[in-house]
Amino acid sequence: MAEEFDKKKLRQLARRDGDAVADWFETFCDKLYTFVFYRVSEDPLMAADVVRETFLAALRQISQFDVSYGSMFAWLTHLSADCVKKALHNAGKERSQQHIWTGLDQSLATACQNIATEPIPEELLERTETAQLVQMTLASIPDRYSDILTDYYYKMNTTGQIAGAMEEDELAVTATLYQGRLAFKAAFTKLAAWLKPDGAKG
């Protein structure tokens, strides 16, 4: 199932068609779980509960989804914010994510927001709070971008090696890598605002 949903697929979900619902869940559950996991203090049971509640909320509100405003995954992550907030509140951990922003000093903030033009220094990537934010951010951007950023920054593959593995022109890979950096920067900025104690949530 592609990220872009047509009216037929939405009608199937609205009718609670079993196959359509199962396909929808299988398509997005793993990525949504990764996105949520770091927002609930890396609690696997709480993350699973939030994912379930997010899908239930989405199914109840499926008529409100409008593909012209963004992808299905973006909508699911938007809905997950309230589910995360409720789960943390019920567990008495509503302030548990503030340590990430507290540990995000200016050098880290600058490095992450400048990723469109500069790589994150290795010493910053080794820090726990950096790793958490990077994983949360990678989980919130399209796979084609998160995959190429992972290949380039974590696996240390060159654009030539990535192009060979993907059977694509190196120039195209370089362009996708740049687009991925822009997507990462936008997602990171939004995520940082979400994590700020006084930031906008959702």
Image: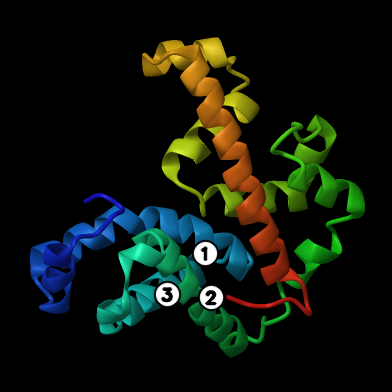
Residue plotted at (74% across, 31% down)? 119
C-alpha span from label 1 to label 3? 10 Å
Secondary structure of residue under mark 1:
helix
Label located before the other in sequence (2 or 3): 3
Q: Position of residue 109 (x, y in %)?
A: 82, 52
Q: Position of residue 68 (x, y in %)?
A: 35, 64
Residue plotted at (58% across, 17% down)? 157
How crowded is the residue under tag 1: few (<14 C-alpha within 10 Å), some, or many (20+)?
many
Identified by mark 3, the residue type is: Asp
Which residue corresponds to mark 3? 49
Task: Pick whichever, 77 or 122, lies toward us.
Answer: 77
23 lies left or right of 193: left
Residue plotted at (76% across, 32% down)? 118
How crowded is the residue under tag 3: few (<14 C-alpha within 10 Å), some, or many (20+)?
some
Identified by mark 1, the residue type is: Val
Residue 126 visible in image? no
Which of the numbered marks, if any, corresponds to residue 36? 1
Label located before the other in sequence (1 or 3): 1
Residue plotted at (56% across, 38% down)? 180
Label located before the other in sequence (1 or 2): 1
Q: Quadrant of residue 29?
A: bottom left
C-alpha span from label 1 to label 2? 9 Å
Task: Pick whichever, 65 or 45, lies toward us.
Answer: 65
Identified by mark 2, the residue type is: Ala
Q: Are marks 1 and 2 in contact (CB under 8 Å)?
A: no
Q: Quadrant of the C terminus?
A: bottom right
Which residue corresponds to mark 2? 81
